[in-house]
Image (tube, rainbow, N blue to C red):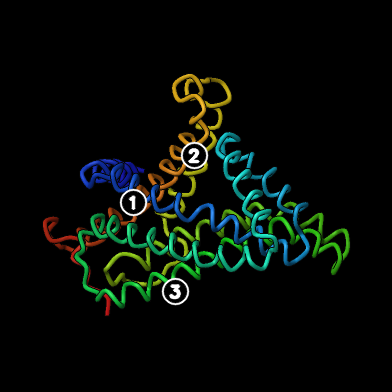
Amino acid sequence: MRRVWQVAKRSVLSFYDDQGTHHAAALTYYALMSLFPTLLLAVSLLGLLGEYPATYNAILGHLRGVVPAATLAPLDAAVRAALKSKGTAAVGLGVAILTALYGATGYLEAARRALNVVFEASSGRSFARRKMIDIASTVVLMTLVLTTLVLMFAGGGLAREVLGGQAASLWRILRWPAAFVSALFAFSFIYYVTPDVQQRAVRWITPGALAGVALWLAASAAFSSYLANFHSFNVTYGSFAAAIILLVWLWLTNIALLLGAEINAEIERAKETAEGVPESQTLNLPSPP
């Protein structure tokens, strides 16, 4: 227990020493650039599958349990307006793929800069190699997110049609643990792929990912409770309150992501110290091939 406390304490201190809040702000900018087209992509896919608007409304209903309602309002309005102006789901899908890829690759580049600071690494990859990794990683992450949405919100109907009512009832219980595991994979994937270090082994679920997802859920719940009981954002920002709330929630999300990375780095540092490596030389991880 003492070791856990030491790792947690060092992680928080390292987060502030590494200017984690500033890196989280940069990640928030790129997340905002990619959030709307990614949501538009998901809705366009649902339209092609004949699941819009019923499944889309179900997604919004479930997201309101995690994301502050004021955060979803501007996104919902923008997505509905975009789909209406595009005319067809197929056209919206094509536009969404291009814009989502552009925004998400920028997010991963910002994540690389932040995680290089966390792991005390310098960029050892060429520009072309970094972009290839960013594009491939973006496709993997978007596939993971979209698969999660399908399993959570369309999977129940599919299970009912293929396997019967009992399977659908079982899936209603299992879909939230599945979403939690999917978020763990997403966090661990970012931690493994983006920094310019060659880590010891591929670990799809890391302590930092567990802590990061738990912190994200706790921060989202606390922020939602704050908004429900206090109205300072509406008083201070007026008509801009919804946009500011979205930015703050994304910022909290990225803080949780970076804190999870700091935990992984401190665990690695503790392992090297236990192996006899001087503390001044810890985290001397090799560059990726």
The mark closer to the camera, 2 or 1, is: 2
Amino acid bearing label 1: Ile
Q: Is residue 188 above or below residue 239?
A: below
Residue 184 lies, in percent from the top left, at: 50, 57
Residue 116 lies, in percent from the top left, at: 25, 60
Kindly identify the residue that appears in the image at 63 percent across and 60 percent down.
42
Mark 2 vs 3: CB contact within 8 A: no
Mark 3 vs 1: CB contact within 8 A: no
Amino acid bearing label 2: Leu
The mark closer to the camera, 2 or 3, is: 2
Q: Which residue is mark 2?
A: 246
In terms of depth relative to the viewer, which is nearer, 94 or 109?
A: 94
The mark closer to the camera, 3 or 1, is: 3
Q: Is residue 158 above or below residue 73?
A: below
**Counting residues from the N terminus, which is met first, the one under dot 2 or under dot 1?**
2
Quadrant holding the N terminus:
top left
Labelled disc at residue 263? 1
In terms of depth relative to the viewer, which is nearer, 241 or 205?
A: 241
Separation of marks 2 and 3 at Cα, in angstroms: 27 Å
Q: Left or right: where does residue 240 sit relative to residue 25?
A: right
Tag 2, which secondary structure? helix
